[in-house]
Structure formats: C-alpha cells, structure tokens
Image (tube, rainbow, N blue to C red):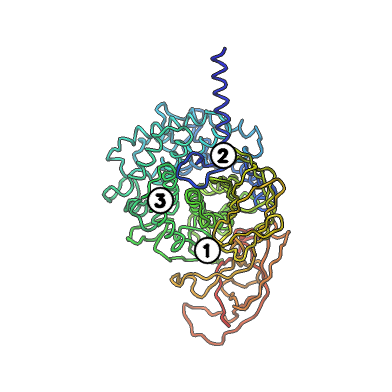
Amino acid sequence: MKKTLTILSFFFTLILLAQEKGVIDNSNSEFVKFKSINIGDCVWTDGFWADKFEVAEKVMVPYMGTLLKGDTGHALNNFKIAAGLKEGKHEGMFWHDGDFYKWMEASMYIYAINKDEKIITDLDEIIAIIGKAQLENGYLQTQTQLKNIKPFSQRKYHEMYNSGHLYIAASIYYRITGKRNFLDIAIKHANNLYETFQPQPKELARFGFNQVQIMGLVELYRTTKDRKYLELAEIFINMRGKSELKPDPSVNTNNIGDMTQERTPLRKSKEAVGHAVLALYYYAGAADVYAETGEQALIDALDILWGNIVNQKMFVTGACGQKHDGGSSHRDFVHEAFTIDYEMHNQNAYNETCANLCNAMFNQRMLSVKGESKYADVMELVLYNSGLSGISLEGKDYFYTNPLRRTFDHKMGITDYANRVPYIPCFCCPPNLVRTIAKSSAWAYSLTKNGIAVNLYGGNKLTTKQLDGSAIELTQETQYPWEGRVNITIKKAKKNVFDIQLRIPEWAEDTTIKVNGKSVDTEILEGTYVTITRKWKKGDVIAIDMPMDVNLLEGNAKIEEVRNQVAIKRGPLVYCLETPDLPENTSILDMYLPLDTKFTSTYKKDLLGGITAIEGTLKVRKDKKEGMYHELDNVQWESINTQFVPYYSWSNRGTAEMTVWLPLLWN
C-alpha cells in the first residue's frame, strides 16, 4: 500500500510539473535571459487579441478540425489507413502529418485557456489512432508507410518536418495534461531517429529537407531530460554544409546548395539563403540549441543571419521569402526563398504565411536568449501584419502568399489566390497561423532574473510565479494597437524589490511612463526595455503612453522596387490602400500620395471587425496611356479623399486591388 501511494504521489507530481511549463519550456535553459511563462498563465481578456483568440476558439480551430478530420483534408484518414482502421490511400502533401500535428497543438492551447474537456477527449481518441499507426520500431510517417517507401530514402518526403511537429505537439500535450500517451509515441519515434542518425552514416549526411526536427528534438529534451535528443539536434546542425554538393537523386536536382542551406555550414554563414521556411525553422532550432549549450559560434552566426534578414531581406510587414523562384548570391536555384539582398518586389512578393510566422518564432527565441527589444519588435510586426494577413476576419479562409501589391490582372501562381480560400491543398500555413494566434498570450510576458518583462501589449491578465517562486498577478487595460495608452495594475506582488521591464517599441518616440501618476525617474528610449525597480504593492498602476502618430516610411535606396514610394504605418500596424475605398474604375496604380497630405485617424467599429482607419487626400492621375513606354506630357491630376486600412484586413470586402507602397508626389 505504501509503495502504491508513493507511486501515485510521484505520478501526481509529474502531472503538476507538466502543467508548470511554458509553450517553449526554457525554464531550465542556462543560456536564456527571458524565460517562458507557463501555458495559460496569461489570458487575453479584452480588445484586439482577446477578439482574435475568441475567433480561434470558436471558429478557427473547430473549423480546421472538421477539414483535417474529414475527407477534405484527409489527414486523420491517413493515420486511420496506416493503423488498419480504414481502407484507402494516402492523400495530401508529404508534410500533411506535420500540419495535422500543428492543428492538434493549436487545440491544446485553446484547452489550456478554456479547460473544455471535450477537446482532450477528442485528442485522446486521435492519439490512440496515431499510436496504432506507429510501427513497432517507432517509425511513423503515413506518406511513406502507405506508399511502401523505404524510410529515410528520399528527403523530399519531409520526414524531418513531420517528426519535429510531432515532438513539439507531444511535449505540449504532456505539459498541459500530464498524460504520457502522446509523449510515449514521440519518445519511441525519436529513439528510432537517434538510432538511425546518431551513427551519422555517410548516405544520410545530407538528409532532411525542412529542419523542424531540430526544434522538436530540443523541446523533447527539455521535456524528458534525455540528453541524446539534444545531441541529435546538434548533429543535424553539424550535418549541414559538410558534404560535397552534387545532384541528389532523392530530391529535385535544383533543390541543392543554398536552396536547403547546405552550401555553407551554419557557423560560417553570413547571409540568409534558400527556402525561407526551411531557413527560419533551421535558425530557430539553432537558437534553441544555443539556449541549452551556450555555444558562442552558434549565437554569433545567428546574430549575423538575423541582421541580414532584418536589414536586407525582410519586407516592411515583417514578411520573408522575396520570390517564388529565384537565385541566391551563389547563383543556386532557390524556391519560395530568400534571394539576393534588397530584391523586394511588391506585386510578386511571395511572403509565404509560414515563412512570416517562422520569422516571428526565430525572433521569439532570439528575444529569449538575448533579452533585447529589437527581437520583440519584429515578433510583434509579424503578428499584426504579415502573419495575421494569412487568415480572414471570419477565421475560415486562408492566404498562402502575402504580396504587398495586387492588381486585378495579376497572373496567379499555383499557391496565389485572388481572395483567401477555404482550403489550400498545401495546407502548412493555416494550422501554423492558428496555433500562433492560440498561443500568442504566452509570448506577452517573460520571466527575468529579478522580475518580469512585458513583451506585448493587449488587454490581459497575468497570474504566474517569478523565478524565485513568488506569486505575481497583474492586469493590462488598453485599446492597443488602436490607442497607445496602456494601464498595468498590480494585483499581487512579493514584498521585496523586483523589476518590471517594459518594452518601448522602436516606433514609439516620446513615450511617457508614470507609476501611480508620477513620471518615472529613468530614461525612456524607444527600441529598448525600460526597467522600473521598486517595491511593488497591490494597487500600483503603471501608465504607459505611446504616441500613435501616422508615419511615412521609405525604403533603403538600394530597394529599386520602392524608390520614391512610401508606406504608411501607425503604431505596430502597416496600412494599405484597397479599391473598395477608391472611386469606381480607379486602379491603385493611378494613385499618388502628396508629401503634404494631412492624415486623421478614426476608430470605426463597423468596418472590418472594428479598426482605426487612416484618412487622407490622394492624387489620381487621369492621363492614363497604354503601351510599354510613352512620352510624358499633359499630366492630369484629380484629388480625392480616401481611407487606408490595416494590411492584415485587406481582401475581406470582395476581390480587390491593394497596395502598401504608394508613389510620392514631392509637390
């Protein structure tokens, strides 16, 4: 009896420990300055992100589940067939298993907030099917099992992508529920991966196409404390860039070199190259490895790569992946990719939703290890702009690509759509976006050595424990991003002195901060965290006021595509011009912005779900001429008053033209 009680006590301790972990569990990571809060510790309560979470809870996740569990998405069917529970063949892309795991992960974040037991009941049924589909040796990949393809014979089958998302989803499930059913599947699977790759056979030296397994292995290591998973994650980093580059029969002959980040070892890389999703998952995984090992060469390389992305290859919306097809600086073919520096086409910008979200993930990890505001700035930029643009306001339709300009006569590619669509055959982006929205509250705060850091603003409630075990509770009240005033009220705090670090976005010049009505006696610099150290007590109020000016942005002179053009930004939001706000039969290509335009900002609750629109005067050029080139003469202008809407909200009012950048009239 005593032994039974001891076992039960140990089991319940495991459950409690599992529930006290973050989305990314870096709580025990030595080389991390900003540590994660626990899943569910922060809840959006009102305003922008509370509204988005509600749509995720009530529409996005259930609707997506209907697709993926039914015949449209066929993802669960694949597992049922592999488990011998259903007749049929594999359908969907090679990476469809991973997309299903991402939807499961999103469901878990919803459960962590609303505690709806039906979610767990449904997931347990799915996990049981997945377990039956798994081979005895741990291998699990429906796309190869159902086609009788030899495991790890061709890297185009995305076995590493699926593996990584399995490990992440299983780790999250264990942390939230304390149940081992999904985790045991992942452990068995990862052991098979270790046994296959740890000997580092020469024939697998270049294996892996999309490197999600690195992040997944680190998360599994953090969950199980089994160091072989961290060892394997490092092996996968070390494998890249050490093999002779020659045609690989396991992939399209074009998909070698920079395309898959295998021309140059990561530690010697000076620029971001190749498929943007592959690259950013890879860099995010390397940041996770650094958080555990502290290897200086890794973080030095990631610093350089981050600078190249943000300063030479990232769009004003935080989007990444300049072209559908192009060439690297080494002249390797690249697909959905980072190309050469400053090549930033608007109409043909690819900006896959996954790449944009991966940019946020990479920056979230860099924020954790470095504790610097610039990473949170990029993370926030993506969340409000190039991430959120991938889904409709209703929550049921999706974009794969996110251009910065679109005209009615644009020739669509296979993943381009004139409007968001209810199902994309390449379904990687929708669940990636939905899981990001569902877990966004977990990115709002971090735990620091002597307090907390406020990374994101929005109406929320935080109930957590500091690193010393002391309880802290606070609330945020704000209409951010429509307004720049934020009130943070302390509800519970320890008696000793501790820090509250407040992120001041790089655009928030002349921000003021008051505590209980008195200005703080510290320098407030945009683009930094302002640290306030004091004995906090219940009822203390921090009032932050960030000016929400309308700003015109211009691009680097080397970006040919935006020379003499400007983009409009207010707070964290990039705005665009859309044809529903123009006179009939007027093209966005006829619109010019006078330099002396006066802007006004007005909140419109009935427009696009409630937004702050920016109003101003534009010039319409009326002397339109046909032909490739023509003589400039008799230029005719007409003034119109119009409005600009947040970029994320475009294409929610029917088929439309849209542009972020506008040619400037210097008067």
Q: Which mark is residue 316?
A: 1
**How many numbered discs, if any?**
3
| Amino acid beneath label 3 | Ile
Does label 1 or label 2 sit earlier along the sequence? 1
**Which residue does the image show at 52% across and 61% down from the upper left?**
403
> How far apart in space, not on screen, are marks 1 and 2 (Cα)?
40 Å
Q: Nearer the viewer, residue 472 or 186?
A: 472
> How far apart in space, not on screen, are marks 2 and 3 (Cα)?
27 Å
Does the image show residue 426?
no
In the picture, residue 258 is in which quadrant?
A: bottom left
Residue beneath disc 2: 468
Q: Which mark is residue 299?
A: 3
Q: Note whether 5 is above or below 477 in the view shown.
A: above
Does label 3 or label 1 sit earlier along the sequence? 3
Does the image show residue 172?
yes
| Amino acid beneath label 1 | Val
In the picture, residue 324 is in which quadrant?
A: bottom left
**Which residue does the image show at 42% across and 60% down from the upper left?**
308
Q: Secondary structure at mark 2?
A: loop
Mark in front: 2 vs 3: 2
Circle 2 packing at 10 Å, graded few (<14), some (14-19), many (20+), is few
Q: Nearer the viewer, residue 313 or 415?
A: 313
> How far apart in space, not on screen, are marks 3 and 1 (Cα)?
25 Å
Question: Which residue is at the far top?
Answer: 1
